[in-house]
Image (spheres, rainbow, N blue to C red):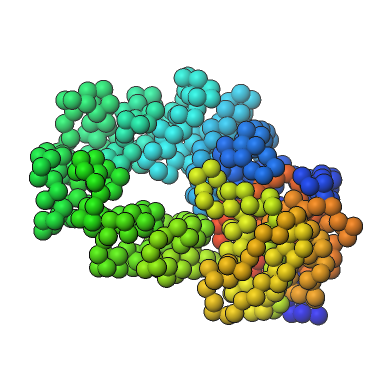
Amino acid sequence: MSRLNRKADKAALRSAVRTNGRSLPTHQGGIGFERDARSELFLLAVANFVSQQTFYEDGAGRDDRFRALVRRLAVSDPEWTAGLLGWLRGDANMRTASLVGAAEYVKARLDAGATDGPANRQVVASVLRRPDEPGEFLGYWTQTYGRAVPQPVKRGIADGVRRLYHGKALLKYDTAAKGFRFGDVLNVVHATPDPARPWQGDLFRYALDRRHHPRTAVAPASVDVLVAHRELMAVPVAERRAVLTSAGGAERLAAAGMTWEALAGWLQGPMDKAAWEAVIPSMGAMALVRNLRNFDEAGVSDEAAARVAAKISDPAEVARSRQFPIRYLAAYRHAPSLRWAYPLEQALGHSLAGVAPLTGRSLILVDRSGSMWAPLSARSQLNRADAAAVFGAALALRAERADLVQFGTGSTDVMYRKGESVLKVLERFGDLGGTNTAEAVRRHFRGHDRVLIVTDEQAAYSRYGDAARAVPAQVPVYTWNLAGYRAAHAPSGPHRHTFGGLSDAAFRMVSLLEAGRDADWPWI
């Protein structure tokens, strides 16, 4: 018996995500299992790009299911639901789902007259993490429930406003394209300035003036970035391009909070080599990643490109950006120049740093069936099949010994070498049709210490039973669900665990489980 199996046998290990004992067919008609409400909401939340159609569910159907689950649990289980929403916007970095969820949480509790659990105001404030989100929240609330905004919503948004509104935020996010400008938000929620930030009162007044009296609004002298921006805007158009190439030009743009998005408008001309090279030093890592093609088309110098490469591949910058690994894969596939390939490969590796090495023998199965090829979101150029392959390859490369398998209607081994690039391994995955998970597990399981399956769980019917039936009860089976559908492909219980989403956070749970600890919800 392996050392890992003996370790796991010390405790009846359980997963936080569980089935409830009732059967529920998968969308392909396979053997499926219904999850309890908490588990269903958790997996849907971490995989739900709001209004996004998936292979088996349209966007409206998924959104309705998400809202109904939030509203139900907000009343019956408020502590847990509030914890989920705060974690969803924080560690999980899921923006829209958390904002919609918090609004539905508050509406359900107000409708029910519920007074137990976390304050509604707290829950609203917990999901506001970026300066444009108070306006986003108000936009969703008023479009869904009308112009009357309840006091708990106003107070929660006001808390967010005091924390998030500053000079650079106003320059970046307070634009005419927004339904709720900063001044509109302030009018609705009546936010008072933070006493610890004496300049914020001036900022609030300026935001109101910008909204209601834009021709006479004057940037306050107490907010340096607004003063610098006002001076930059006063430069005659004919002289603005010279600012870029002058000594200290890049520093002047940065001090004025000039973003790359706004620079072309200020120049009233094209974003050429000089423009990009002036703004690159003040751009964030993910803004750089998104503009690699633009840099090449403008012909930025090798020196500027080296600065970009250093920043996007810096481990601290990758950690700070909190982007999913697939963002780097998308950039790698669409960047026109080979000079970006290695930095993006490094960045992808850093983004997967949380994938812990697995000791012993591991069987890793990656779903490459037809339903996995649906895009992750309406704006994404990548799909769940590639997301699954990235994580599967990363797990295999970090494992002591692993068999990496891709499956669909059939299944095949994916060959790799230790120390090889995840991106190189990814090139060996294909499109394999149906979803015969149970057969893939039965065919490839050979006394491994654990089985890990990255999938949407929509398995076809198999005469061999559910997806985990071929694995002995004492051997752990870990499933990563990337779509959030209702039906599970195997029942939960001791040594049967399901995680959700695209972040590497869940991968850290394997080591906790095998050390004899229960896998609880990530915010607990």
Residue 350 seen in this snapshot: no
Image quadrant assignment for residue 278: bottom left
- Give the residue at x 58% y 55%: 502
Which of the pair 412/308 is nearer the observer? 412
Q: Is residue 276 left or right of residue 143?
A: left
Q: Is residue 272 left or right of residue 522?
A: left
Q: Is residue 117 left or right of residue 157?
A: right
- Give the residue at x 77% y 59%: 409
Q: Is residue 370 left or right of residue 281?
A: right
Residue 369 seen in this snapshot: yes
Question: In x, y percent, where is residue 331?
Answer: 45, 58
User: Could you tell me how many numbered marks the image carries?
Assistant: 0
Residue 198 position (above or below residue 355): above
Which of the pair 59/185 is nearer the observer? 59
Question: In x, y percent, where is residue 4?
Answer: 73, 76
Which of the pair 406/67 is nearer the observer? 406
Residue 48 position (above or below residue 63): below
Image quadrant assignment for residue 54: top right
Question: In x, y percent, where is residue 445?
Answer: 79, 71
- Give the residue at x 79% y 66%: 441
Question: In x, y percent, where is residue 207?
Answer: 27, 31
- Give the residue at x 59% y 59%: 386
Image quadrant assignment for residue 309: bottom left
